[in-house]
Image (cartoon, rainbow, N blue to C red):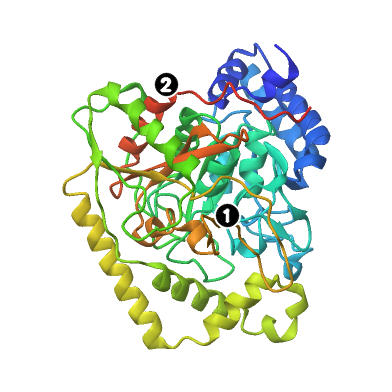
Amino acid sequence: MTKDDICYMSACEMLEKIRTQEMTSLKITDTIIERIEKINPLVNAYCTPTFDLAREMAKKADLSVKEGKELGPLNGIPLSIKDLMMTKGIKTTFGSKLYENFIPESEDIAVKRLKMAGAVILGKVNTPEFGHIALTKNKIFGETKNPWDLDRNSGGSSGGSASAVASGLGPLSLASDGGGSIRIPSSLCGVCGLKATFGRIPIAPRLRVAFLTLDHYGPIARYVEDAALMLNVMKGFHPLDYKSLPDDGINYVEILKEKPKNLKIGYSMNLGFINILDDEVEKNVRNGIEKLDRFDWTIDNAKIKLKRPELAFSVIVSSGIAYDFKNEINERPQDLSPDLRNMIKAGLTYQGLDLEKAQTMRLKLYEQMHDYFKNYDLLITPTTPLYAFNVDWNDMGTRFPSIKNRALSITSWMAFTYPFNMTGHPAISIPCGWSNKGLPIGMQIVGRRYDEKTVLQVAKAFEDVAPWQDKRPSLS
């Protein structure tokens, strides 16, 4: 087995090799660290490596095996943490100059659960400032590149997570999603990204209130089974997060051995309001849907027509951001990115009635999805309207590309993903094809509230008939 093969090994396979000591956690960790030192200067995924800590954690995992101790479900598995999650004793910048040297004394619940499960922390990975945009660049660490084309962006806001996993710099990454931030970079980087049901994975402590009712945590991985493994560890109620859900008692790795029967799956290429979609994206998603025909499920065009939710989403997000940074916009504007400054300024113009109207629109969106799921078990869409692109960053704000003479914007770029942050439904992005330029294209599978089981089972069924892990970016 080559060093690259070790770096691209699934977490589940690593786990078995570590348990039998066919391969030690330390050897796996050292091999991945060696690759990070070689490849990260190209992709800029890791912003704060913790290699000494990782080696100590790996040694501890190996010792647990040798001493016959009860092993955690992630014993010895190396992974990365998005730089929006607080890590005790490890620099956490939130991608912002405001917190450039911040070292938390407390730790995110999800991070703590990963460590208790025996995970090895390789370091923090890059994110845009406070995760405010679905592309990854900030004033401290710069831009995270797409491993399939280093002239293009990795997506965001979990761009560091997706770029790292796709580049073989760790099999797993803890990510977050407030409007598409797990699914979008997973789509652009050719990996698997799960946004669990709202509240499934606790989120606390929180530093700011923006995205408070939209944020979902979840895994980014190369394999569906690995995402399920990570979900098992992180899910379940915690009293510090009043929105968190009780543990559902499901072993998500075990349920992947089953194929659901008698499913009715709908698909949509526009959700009834999206008018920008690249032809190659649509072609590959349709081809992906056709691959599911062999499972004898009912699949048809859902013809869903959601009421355009863009205004409601923008008001909710911008209001929260404005509340968080109403002082900084005046005191330290030079330390804020242009897009974040624009969001703050927009949010400061909204009044209480605007926010209540937005929340009413959000409720109606949820009711529409509730009606949809009376007739269907799942919904399939493209993850993004376009594959990865070269970003035009400027002092006025990000300039997005055009598709068929229609320019994308911050919000329309996320049009297939953010509606399901507003409704709280579980959703996964999996690779379904490749553009003519060799860039990954993602397909989104959305399930009923609390039904990660069916979402993951169908994603695994698709992975079995159309695996994507045989492709690796040419980085070395």
Q: Is residue 1 left or right of residue 162?
A: right
Rendering coords of residue 244 (x, y %): 39, 56
108 or 468, which lies in front? 468
Q: Is residue 384 left or right of residue 97?
A: left
Determine the residue positioned at 73% across, 80% down.
333
Quarter of the image holding residue 476? top right
In this view, 85 is above or below 315: above
Residue 108 is marked as: 1
Rendering coords of residue 310 (x, y %): 42, 68
In this view, 61 is above or below 344: above
Farthest residue toward the front?
405
Q: Residues within 10 Å of mark 1 (few under 14, many from 20)?
A: some
Rendering coords of residue 4 (x, y %): 72, 21
In this view, 115 is above or below 335: above
93 or 283, which lies in front? 283
Of tags 2 and 1, the one toward the viewer is 2
Q: Residues within 10 Å of mark 2 (few under 14, many from 20)?
A: few
Q: CA distance from mark 2 to mark 1?
A: 34 Å
Q: Amino acid at mark 1?
A: Asp
**Residue 324 appears in the rendering:** no
Q: Circle 2 sits on which residue?
A: 464
Determine the residue positioned at 43% across, 42% down.
282
